[in-house]
Image (cartoon, rainbow, N blue to C red):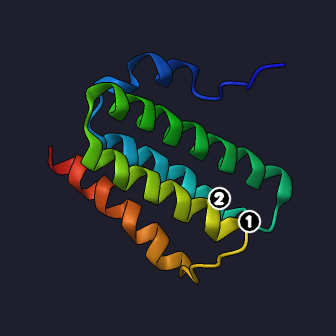
């Protein structure tokens, strides 16, 4: 059985979007995951959707050979996973969300 794609429409056009747009949308799922971290059913959907968008972004950056951005997105994905799966980096949830809020602000300016 294959992975269920949550963002079917996004997959087709994701690579065409700006990195600010991509990271801002990932940030929306991060926000939801933070909001529902004590509700396992709702949290899992948010977590899975965020990972899916991270993967779409990583694939797009690999295709474009934008390795600096790729490294940043991979690190952001790692920190996101770490936060919810043990938080060995001792990440503060407010700083985690603030990171993505900056992309939302940037996208609005574009």
- Placement of 48 over or under 27, stated as above or below: above
Q: Mark 2 Cα within 10 Å, few/some/many (few <14, many 20+)?
A: many
Residue 20 seen from this side: no
Q: Nearer the viewer, residue 107 or 84?
A: 84
- Placement of 52 over or under 4, stated as above or below: below
Q: Which residue is mark 2?
A: 33
Q: Nearer the viewer, residue 82 or 44?
A: 82
**Horizontal side, residue 25 vs residue 41: left or right:** left
> What secondary structure is found at the residue carrying circle 1?
loop
Image location (x, y in percent) of residue 95: 44, 77
Q: Mark 1 Cα within 10 Å, few/some/many (few <14, many 20+)?
A: some
Q: Which residue is mark 1?
A: 37
Say whether marks 2 and 1 touch (CB < 8 Å).
Answer: yes
- At 60% across and 44% down in the image, what residue appears? 51
User: Any mark on residue 17, and which?
Assistant: none
The quarter holding residue 7 reads top right
């Amino acid at each position: 059985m294959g992975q269920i794609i949550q963002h079917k429409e996004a997959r087709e056009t994701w690579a065409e979007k700006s990195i600010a747009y991509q990271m801002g949308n990932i940030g929306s799922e991060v926000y939801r995951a933070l909001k529902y971290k004590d509700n396992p059913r709702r949290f899992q959907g948010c977590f899975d959707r965020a990972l899916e968008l991270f993967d779409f972004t990583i694939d797009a950056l690999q295709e474009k050979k934008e390795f600096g951005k790729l490294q940043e997105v991979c690190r952001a994905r790692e920190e996101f996973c770490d936060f919810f799966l043990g938080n060995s980096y001792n990440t503060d949830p407010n700083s985690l969300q603030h990171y993505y809020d900056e992309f939302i602000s940037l996208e609005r300016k574009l």
